[in-house]
Image: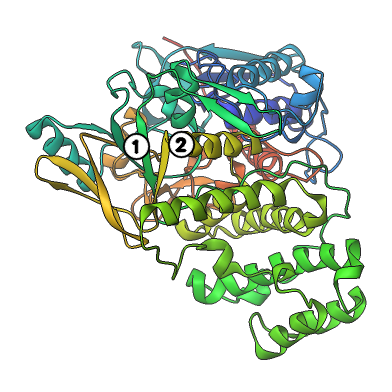
């Protein structure tokens, strides 16, 4: 007898699932005889987002040494550990380099091919270069209907499509219709590599809303991608030489500042002793209000990681030893009078103290008399960020980022997600490479990038788009508006035919835009809250799956591996319990 599983989606999450299924098959299937069907119109490994046909100008936002899709000795899971090279080891050369997106695609393809080639005897992996468009219950299993007209019958299905396209929000739809009616240009949210940027005119102002990773990619494609060059001056300053084909990018966002750059030094300290305070016992019974119930524990964890590194690695900048500080810190509630007093006593210099409000919203309460004042402030802000993120004397920042990674995994285990915290995580810990921020600064000095401030508002006035911010008086008008953001996950607005079909029949539910699953075993929940015995889901667009996005950092017991391994074992056990008579049409 043979078991069979369908994995819908062949990007990093799907590839990791296939690897964990193959790794566990011999242990859980007595035969073993297993067919794994991988369904994706894009080549396996990279999938759509990490496909090879992207410009080399686009980089990853993690160093090559921080990227792996192979388990290692740190991973605490029931399945076997099957080590392999990190991206840096696979590429060779500088582990601190930021690889191109096509290079990462090659690595992910290698992982998939290696998984197939080393699968246990009796395990067969079949790749279907098409889309799954619907599921149906059949005796003992699932029938997967394919876009090419075929049908695959399997024992269980795992949805792992990753980030998908969605229909425009009501605001985006209104802006798109307004642009069509008035002859303006409007580019909605999306991946920069997927956008048609040819219609953006050269040497004209363009309003850009969003300053995260999507803006960095857009900035690169509209400057270096149009023939501009960066050169290093004799004093080390980076200078941009325009080609004359660049638009003039006027950019703002809610924060008004870009994501913090990645740290540019090797972290030498001990791993922060977290998580310690963020536990189910401390949270009590849900439901929880994130800012009221969860954030105080999260903030305490992050501060614990930060001050542990500051005190143990930089003792000359503090007045208390770690044991004394740790005892007092653990006993106090976050932001209590006692905790604030302890931190002031231990850390005399204000710049060495962790201030989440200032970190999260650096422009709050600041007003400038004119745009020149804001530009000067932003140039200084970028310079300080670049300096701090390249200076190991600020290694407490890196320790706090490691704390963020740990906290993210704990929240995923508890099934807790929050849009604000997701944005804060990306802003602090998932920003662009330092060289990209240096390029942004050079573009600003060249007049190609102009900063608009925080809480940016865009409307239509006298036949043009108009952008204004309370940070500075006045505004800017343009005929082109670009949303430099990725679309937020939304089951209700998903265009994926499989998600749409299940949603419309009530066989799939949504929570805060995410696919709802029973977090204990990742089974799909229908609209009534009932779990499906044969349908599962994992990934960043699934409840509790934000920490499993993309790929993993090595030697950090990454949630992606733990969750994928646990799910693989559940699904293999399910498939082994009931095998149906399969047929592939």
Q: Which mark is residue 249?
A: none
For the residue pair 570 and 435, the one nearer the viewer reads as 435
Counting residues from the start of the chain, the first of labels 1 and 2 encountered is 1
Q: Position of residue 402 (x, y in %)?
A: 73, 53
In the image, residue 439 sits, relative to residue 228, either above or below, namely below
Q: Residues within 10 Å of mark 2 (few under 14, many from 20)?
A: some
| Alpha carbon distance from label 1 to label 2 | 9 Å
In the image, residue 350 sits, relative to residue 89, either above or below, namely below
For the residue pair 177 and 316, the one nearer the viewer reads as 316
Q: Position of residue 516 (x, y in %)?
A: 44, 50
Q: Residue at x 52, y 62 (%)?
A: 362
Which image quarter: residue 103?
top right
Q: Residue at x 54, y 40 (%)?
A: 441
Task: Name the element at disc 2.
Answer: helix
Task: Name the element at disc 1.
Answer: loop
For disc 2, the marked residue is: 214
As drawn, the residue found furthest toward the bottom would be 337
- Mark 2 and mark 1 in contact (Cβ < 8 Å)? yes
In the image, residue 71 sits, relative to residue 343, either above or below, namely above
Question: Image check: 173 left or right of 545?
Answer: left
For disc 1, the marked residue is: 189
Q: Residues within 10 Å of mark 1 (few under 14, many from 20)?
A: many
As drawn, the residue found furthest toward the front would be 234
């Amino acid at each position: 007898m043979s078991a069979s599983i369908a994995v819908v989606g062949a990007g990093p999450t799907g590839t990791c699932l296939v690897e964990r299924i193959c790794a566990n098959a011999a242990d859980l299937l007595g035969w073993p005889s297993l067919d794994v069907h991988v369904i994706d119109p894009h080549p396996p490994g990279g999938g759509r987002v990490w496909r090879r046909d992207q410009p080399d100008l686009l980089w990853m936002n993690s160093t090559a040494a921080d990227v792996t899709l192979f388990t290692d000795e740190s991973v605490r899971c029931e399945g076997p550990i099957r080590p392999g090279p990190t991206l840096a080891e696979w590429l060779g050369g500088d582990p601190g380099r930021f690889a191109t997106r096509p290079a990462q695609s090659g690595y992910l393809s290698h992982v998939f091919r290696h998984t197939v080639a080393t699968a246990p005897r009796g395990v067969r992996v079949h790749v279907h270069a098409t889309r799954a468009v619907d599921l149906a219950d059949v005796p003992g299993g699932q029938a997967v209907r394919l876009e090419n007209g075929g049908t695959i019958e399997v024992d269980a299905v795992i949805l792992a499509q990753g980030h998908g396209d969605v229909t425009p929000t009501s605001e985006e739809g209104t802006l798109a219709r307004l642009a069509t009616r008035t002859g303006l240009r409007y580019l909605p949210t999306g991946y920069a590599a997927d956008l048609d940027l040819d219609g953006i005119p050269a040497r004209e102002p363009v309003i850009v809303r969003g300053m995260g990773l999507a803006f960095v990619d857009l900035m690169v494609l509209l400057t270096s991608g149009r023939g501009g060059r960066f050169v290093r001056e004799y004093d080390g300053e980076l200078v941009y030489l325009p080609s004359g084909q660049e638009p003039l990018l006027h950019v703002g966002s809610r924060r008004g500042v870009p994501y913090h750059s990645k740290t540019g030094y090797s972290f030498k300290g001990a791993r922060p002793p977290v998580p310690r305070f963020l536990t189910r016992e401390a949270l009590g019974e849900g439901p929880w209000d994130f800012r009221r119930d969860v954030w105080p524990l999260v903030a305490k964890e992050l501060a614990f990681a930060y001050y542990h590194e500051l005190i143990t690695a930089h003792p000359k900048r503090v007045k208390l030893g770690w044991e004394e500080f740790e005892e007092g810190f653990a006993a106090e509630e976050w932001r209590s009078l006692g905790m604030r007093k302890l931190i002031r006593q231990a850390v005399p210099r204000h710049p060495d103290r962790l201030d989440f409000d200032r970190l999260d919203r650096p422009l709050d309460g600041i007003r400038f008399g004119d745009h020149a004042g804001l530009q000067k402030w932003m140039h200084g802000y970028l310079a300080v960020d670049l300096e701090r993120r390249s200076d190991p004397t600020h290694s407490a920042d890196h320790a706090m980022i490691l704390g963020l990674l740990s906290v993210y995994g704990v929240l995923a285990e508890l099934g807790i997600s929050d849009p604000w915290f997701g944005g804060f995580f990306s802003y602090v810990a998932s920003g662009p490479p330092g060289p990209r921020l240096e390029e942004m600064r050079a573009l600003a000095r060249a007049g190609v990038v102009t900063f608009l401030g925080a809480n940016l508002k865009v409307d239509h006035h006298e036949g043009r788009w108009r952008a204004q911010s309370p940070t500075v008086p006045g505004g800017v008008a343009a005929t082109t508006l670009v949303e430099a953001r990725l679309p937020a996950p939304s089951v209700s607005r998903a265009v994926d035919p499989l998600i749409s079909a299940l949603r419309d029949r009530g066989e799939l539910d949504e929570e805060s835009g995410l696919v709802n699953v029973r977090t204990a075993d990742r089974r799909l929940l229908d609209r009534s809250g009932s779990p499906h015995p044969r349908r599962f889901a994992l990934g960043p667009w699934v409840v509790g799956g934000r920490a499993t996005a993309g790929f993993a950092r090595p030697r950090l017991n990454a949630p992606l591996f733990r969750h994928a391994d646990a799910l693989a074992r559940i699904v293999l056990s399910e498939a082994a319990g009931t095998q149906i008579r399969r047929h592939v049409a």
